[in-house]
Amino acid sequence: MQTLTQVLKASTTPSALQDVLMTTTNTCIDICNALHKGSLAGILGVAGNENVQGEEQKKLDIISNDMLKTALLACPEVRAVASEEEDDIVPANTAGEYLIAFDPLDGSSNIDINAMVGTIFSIYHDTGSDAATEQSFLKPGTEQVAAGYVLYGPSCMLVLTTGQGVQMFTLDPEKNEFIQTQSKVEVPADTQEFAINMSNQRFWSAAMQTYVNDLVAGATGTREKDFNMRWVAAMVGDVHRILCRGGIFIYPWDSKSPNRAGKLRLMYEANPMAMLIEQSGGKAHTHSQRILDIQPEGIHQRVAVILGAANEVDKCLSY
Ligand code: F6P
Ligand code: MN
């Protein structure tokens, strides 16, 4: 079995990008170790601040953000970072050639119940003689050169794409190294499993309500088959399930979110997950367009997300 280092070395991934990926994933191993200590390290619970989205920050959100920021700013290949937990982008080495946007701890409300969380990242190539700005990050997701997440679950897993399919790696905690455990991830085109937060139903568009009603009607409705439902409440967990056994994940726009956008963030949630899903044969859309084609307007922009099994995403969009 090959280590992440060996897989990257044997690939066409530029060595500078390999350095960025190794810095990111090694820091995630450190985050994983911090999570494992849990309350013993005194790092659970609320830190008493709000992030730029007006959400309560957990101590571990801040710790993970600081760990990634410190490591990436020290990596000479990194030109700038953007994070869910930073209001503005943070310029690093102007001569560096990579921009990295990340959600340091996705699903952080799961921490207090010892459930799944993860780190999501999206990497772009960018050069210039001046320091990077927010504008440097505002490229459509089609231009990502790598994307992935590290899932802190019963085992710690890295799921990665550099644009040539999706690979899964499992952390060997004795060697502190990611070992490749799946070389080609494929999302089946059809599914009988969906993920959506049903408690928001009355705030969705009429079309989304009809679509989900038809899923719930199962074999007695127009779909003529039963559907199962799952909701991890951490996008990283729901997307991981889809990459493992298929399904559709939806966080639609709703009438209670600002500007009727969705909840999820384009740059460090929707885009990297859309790249992973498309690289596995699935689809990722908003209500009206392919996620990867969106021209971003801000690093913290929110979008609606409908992703997973290709035929089921098409079916949803047909409503
Ligand atoms: O980061 C936002 C997020 O935590 C996602 O990981 C997750 O899919 C979603 O929010 C959960 O939302 P809700 O609280 O509506 O279940
Ligand atoms: Mn998140």
Image (cartoon, rainbow, N blue to C red):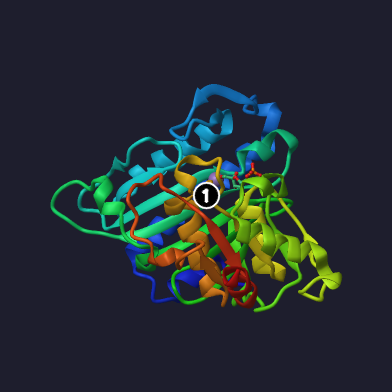
Q: Amino acid at mark 1?
A: Gly
Instruction: Note whether residue 24 is visible.
Output: no
- Where is residue 103? Give x, y as percent: 49, 46
Instruction: Note whether residue 13 is visible.
Output: yes
Q: On the rendered structure, is 81 left or right of 285?
A: left
Residue ranking furthest to the left: 129
Ligand 1: quadrant of the figure: top right
Q: Nearer the viewer, residue 160 or 253?
A: 253
- Where is residue 34? Give x, y as percent: 61, 37
Q: On the rendered structure, is 163 left or right of 219?
A: left
Residue ranking furthest to the top: 48
Look at the picture and state if 242 lies above or below 259: below
Q: Secondary structure at mark 1?
A: loop
Residue ranking furthest to the right: 220
The residue located at (68%, 40%) in the rendering is 110
Look at the picture and state if 249 lies above or below 297: below
All told, the count of numbered labels is 1
Q: Which residue is mark 1?
A: 262
Q: On the rendered structure, is 13 left or right of 148?
A: left
> Which quadrant is home to the C terminus?
bottom right
Is the CB atom of the residue marked by disc 1 within 8 angstroms of ligand 1's nearest atom?
Answer: no
Q: Nearer the viewer, residue 295 or 31?
A: 295
The residue located at (56%, 66%) in the rendering is 3
Instruction: Name the quadrant containing residue 238.
Output: bottom right
The residue located at (28%, 44%) in the rendering is 92
The residue located at (43%, 33%) in the rendering is 52
Look at the picture and state if 310 lies above or below 233: below
- Where is residue 201? Give x, y as percent: 68, 49
Q: Nearer the viewer, residue 228 or 274?
A: 228
Q: Residues within 10 Å of mark 1 (few under 14, many from 20)?
A: many
